[in-house]
Structure formats: structure tokens, C-alpha cells
Amino acid sequence: MSDATWRPSATLDALRLRASVNRRIRDYMTERGVLEVETPVMSRAGNTDPNIASFALEFSGRTDGAPRTRWLRTSPEFPLKRLLAAGVGDCYELGRVFRDGEAGGRHNPEFTMLEWYRLGIDHVALAREAAELVESCLALVGRSARVDETTYAELYRTYVGIDAHRADIGTLRAALGDVQIDPDGLSRDDWLDLLMTHRIQPAFPDDTITIVHDYPASQCALARVRDGDPPVAERFELYLGSLELANGYHELADTDEQRRRFDADILRRSAQGAAAVPRDEALLDALAHGLPACAGVALGVDRLLMALQATPRIADVLAFDFARA
């Protein structure tokens, strides 16, 4: 091991900026009456999403019949929704989350996430609030950004000239142009994602906060689906320049539909040969009790700091990145 690995991967100025951003976030939430809470980092249930890998660990002490295997959270979403069902009201958590297999220039296996929920509003209103928070953080480094709000359909029509809701896979592949991708096993949504990451996202202006909402119903995750022609998922993503910072939903409150989505995730994981992950029965019980109408969003604080410092390396905003942990 090199003698230099004991040193921080971030500068002292970067660490001070992180402290300022954390303070700004807490002030912003306090000003709006959003309660800070803390929820468990270890859970008896994991994240069933086939695109996310969870860390598992074994507890060696007394469990009184409970599972010994616990999962490090990939987000605080499920316990926060349990608090919402219990009547806590608008709430947020600022803390560490963990994802296996994600390490590199823009990823670290443990990172900081801000997640918050607001009662009685939809995903579009929450997206505007998230943009306001990002603008407030930009002011800490003397910067500002304009906000560009668009639908998923408008975005793909503008940037690549296709109907994202109806175009077939052949059309999507052709729109990638000279980008070479192995097509084996890729779904239609995979091709849409590739267009976003390779053709659309890199073209977002640096001084712009881009809000994209109303996704294809097939990309609903934990969002409500709104009937229409075509139906759309009431979901949004927020970008600062080309960096994706946040993902939010008009939250699904239907217990049966949530169970179906968990089960579909588990089947996809099995087909991919991924590790089996238990679904969160406590969340399903909370939804059955009653989740108030709300919207929620998760924002990557490290990604925000990368944007504030104009660096492509997540190591530059972490006291100690994965290689030095």
C-alpha cells in the first residue's frame, strides 16, 4: 500500500463545501417544516430492483426467530414510507446508502443520499422544489442556473427526433447512430436509456437544471401510472448540466400493485441469475394501512458536490474514496 493512501481523496476546501451543503439542506428543510428523521441502515428486506445490487451481512447475535441475514439499505425509501403511513408528515433523511458493484469515476459503493417526501403534491411540484434546492446550493459557490422543464416525450422528440413512447427497437437502435452496443438481451427500455446516456444527457447545457417528467409506463419503478394515450409514469429526473442528480415519483399507494411490481422484479432477478432478495413485507403492510398522497425524491449529494466543484471524479468530493477507505 502506498504511503499516500492514508491521505484524504478530497481537499480541505471540498470537505468544507460538503459541510456547507449539508447545512444548507437542513436549513432549507427546516424553513419548509420538513422533519429530519433517521431510519435503519440494516434491514431484513433488500431492494428487489434488478438493476441495483445490495450488500448482505450476517448477524451473529440473538434474533428471536428473525432472519440473520440483513441488507444494507440502497436508499431509505421503504422505512420513510412506513413513517409516512404512521402519520409523521413531511420528512427527510440525509445519510449514507450502499450499493454493491458500483465503484469508479462517478460511483462509490457507499455514498450520501438526501431523500424527502411532501404530502399533497405531485411529482411535477416536487421536481420544482428540488430544482429550487439545487439553485440554493449553487449560490454557495457563486453560481446560478436556469431551469428547463420538459416531458420525456418532448425531450426525445427534440434531441433525437423519435416518439419515445411508440418507436420500435429498430428505430431506437438507429437513433444511436455510430454508438456501438452489444444488443444481446437488451430490452426496449434499455435502448431508451442508452439514448439518454449517449445522445441526450451529454448535450444538456452546463448552466441548466433540466427536469424531465412523465416517463414511459414501463419505467414506473415506484411511481403511479396515469391513464392516457399513452399512459405515463408520474416520475421525474433532475439533471444539473449532464449529471443526473435526482429521481422522484408521485408515490404509488396501491398495496396490490406494489406487491405485483416486487414479484415482477424478483422474477427478472431470477432470469438474470442475480441473488434472491426478500421483498419488504413491512412496506406492504404500511401501504395496506394507508400511505397519504405524496411525492418523494432521492438526490445524490455527492453528485451535487461534483457539479458544484465541476469535477468528473467522485473521489474529489469524498474524504476517503473506496480505494482509500
Image (cartoon, helix red, strand yellow):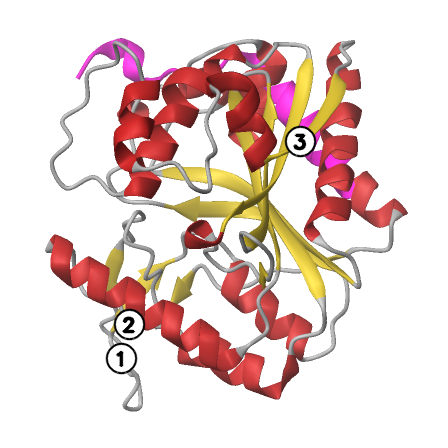
Q: Which residues are magenta?
A: 1-26
Q: CA distance from mark 2 to mark 3?
A: 36 Å
Please give the name of the residue rendered at 40% of the width and 76% of the height, measured from the top-left corner. 259
Please give the name of the residue rendered at 57% of the width and 20% of the height, measured from the top-left corner. 158
Q: Can see residue 9?
A: no
The residue labelled by disc 3 is 150
Q: Which numbered circle lies on residue 278?
A: 2
Q: Amino acid at mark 2?
A: Pro
Horizontally, residue 273 falls left or right of residue 73, namely left
Q: Is 78 above or below relative to 157?
A: below
- Label 3: how many Cα within 10 Å (few below 14, some 14–19, many 20+): some
The residue labelled by disc 1 is 67
The quarter of the image holding the N terminus is top left
Mark 1 or mark 3, which is nearer to you?
Answer: 3
Q: Badges 2 and 1: C-beta atoms under 8 Å apart?
A: yes
Q: x and y percent of residue 127 in the render?
A: 70, 41
